Image (cartoon, rainbow, N blue to C red):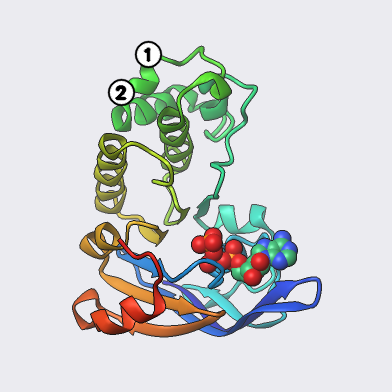
């Protein structure tokens, strides 16, 4: 279980998160929802170690990992697919994948990536930035998958993609979850996120406004907090 308790965090003295409690249980999909500026990305940055909280605790399996570096958290099985994808645009698909694989086990990693997204197999030598947005997102997700992560933090991975590609990405998320990973999913497609989620956290203005199962979520509260919900 990955757990955040009483997290405060912000940028250059401007507070964003205020007393956030959030749990990502083993083998579960957790949807993190909320309007623009609610603090979802900031929370993922705290969970991945990119941003140090100013208060609160983060634990993995009850061990304190507060303030650990991204590198140390990767070693604990935390994998972040950031907004903007986090791939190396000037490297080939192959090199992007090899960089994420365990030395000596590159072929295994490439096979795993292609099993998730066969299209990447046809594009191994292509420079990442020349691929379509959907293909680049597949690469970003495959880079996570080859690490065999325990906790995957996903920031709007369907943003700006065609509906058919979004379907493919959600199929992949189901595969990732069935492989035993837990997902913390920031997603603009609220209804899709609620379909796959075991738990939902709704944030507004840096606080958790609701935490529970999707079936318990009051749709009036959702509509009230969520301008432009889909
Ligand atoms: P969105 O759905 O629009 O991505 P979000 O819920 O992910 O929103 P955040 O990106 O976490 O929200 O932003 C929360 C607040 O923190 C916003 O007021 C934003 O302006 C501010 N913020 C985010 N990044 C920075 C930064 N690097 N420096 C200063 N303020 C920031």
Near mark 1 (Cα within 10 A), the count class, few <14, some 14-19 or many ≥20, is few
Q: Mark 1 points at which residue?
A: 122
Locate the N terminus by quadrant.
bottom left
Identify the residue at image location x=36%, y=82%.
211
**For residue 102, side relative to residue 56 (left or right):** left
* Callout 2 touching callout 1 (CB < 8 Å): yes
Q: Where is residue 113 in the image (x, y as percent from the top left)?
A: 38, 30
* Relative vertical location of residue 148 with respect to residue 31 in this rendering, above or below: above
**For residue 195, side relative to residue 102 (left or right):** left
Identify the residue at image location x=42%, y=45%.
148
On residue 118, the disc is 2
Within the displayed image, which quadrant is ligand 1 positioned in?
A: bottom right
Nearer the observer, 148 or 172: 172
Badge 1 marks a residue whose secondary structure is loop
Nearer the observer, 99 or 224: 224
Residue 51 visible: no
Residue at far right of view: 12
* Relative vertical location of residue 61 with respect to residue 19 in this rendering, above or below: above
Q: Position of residue 69 (x, y in %)?
A: 69, 60
Q: Where is residue 94 in the image (x, y as percent from the top left)?
A: 51, 20
On residue 197, the disc is none
Badge 2 marks a residue whose secondary structure is helix
Near mark 2 (Cα within 10 A), the count class, few <14, some 14-19 or many ≥20, is few
Identify the residue at image location x=36%, y=81%.
224
Residue at far front of view: 228
Nearer the observer, 161 or 27: 161
Q: Position of residue 32 (x, y in %)?
A: 41, 68
């Amino acid at each position: 279980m990955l757990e955040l308790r009483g997290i405060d965090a912000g940028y250059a003295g401007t507070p964003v998160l205020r007393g956030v409690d959030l749990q990502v249980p083993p083998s579960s999909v957790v949807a993190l929802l909320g309007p623009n500026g609610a603090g979802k990305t900031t929370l993922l940055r705290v969970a991945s170690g990119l941003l140090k909280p100013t208060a609160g605790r983060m634990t993995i399996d009850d061990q304190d990992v507060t303030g650990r570096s991204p590198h140390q958290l990767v070693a604990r099985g935390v994998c972040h697919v950031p907004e903007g994808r986090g791939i190396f645009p000037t490297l080939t698909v192959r090199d992007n994948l090899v960089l994420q694989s365990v030395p000596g086990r590159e072929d295994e990693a490439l096979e795993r990536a292609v099993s998730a997204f066969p299209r990447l197999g046809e594009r191994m030598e292509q420079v990442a930035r020349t691929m379509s947005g959907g293909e680049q997102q597949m690469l970003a997700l495959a880079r996570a998958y080859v690490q065999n992560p325990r906790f995957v933090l996903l920031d709007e991975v369907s943003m700006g993609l065609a509906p058919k590609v979004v379907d493919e990405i959600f199929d992949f998320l189901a595969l990732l979850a069935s492989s035993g990973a837990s997902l913390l999913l920031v997603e603009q497609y609220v209804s899709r996120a609620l379909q796959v989620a075991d738990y939902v956290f709704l944030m507004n203005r840096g606080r958790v406004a609701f935490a529970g199962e999707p079936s318990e979520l009051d749709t009036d509260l959702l509509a009230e907090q969520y301008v432009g919900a889909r």
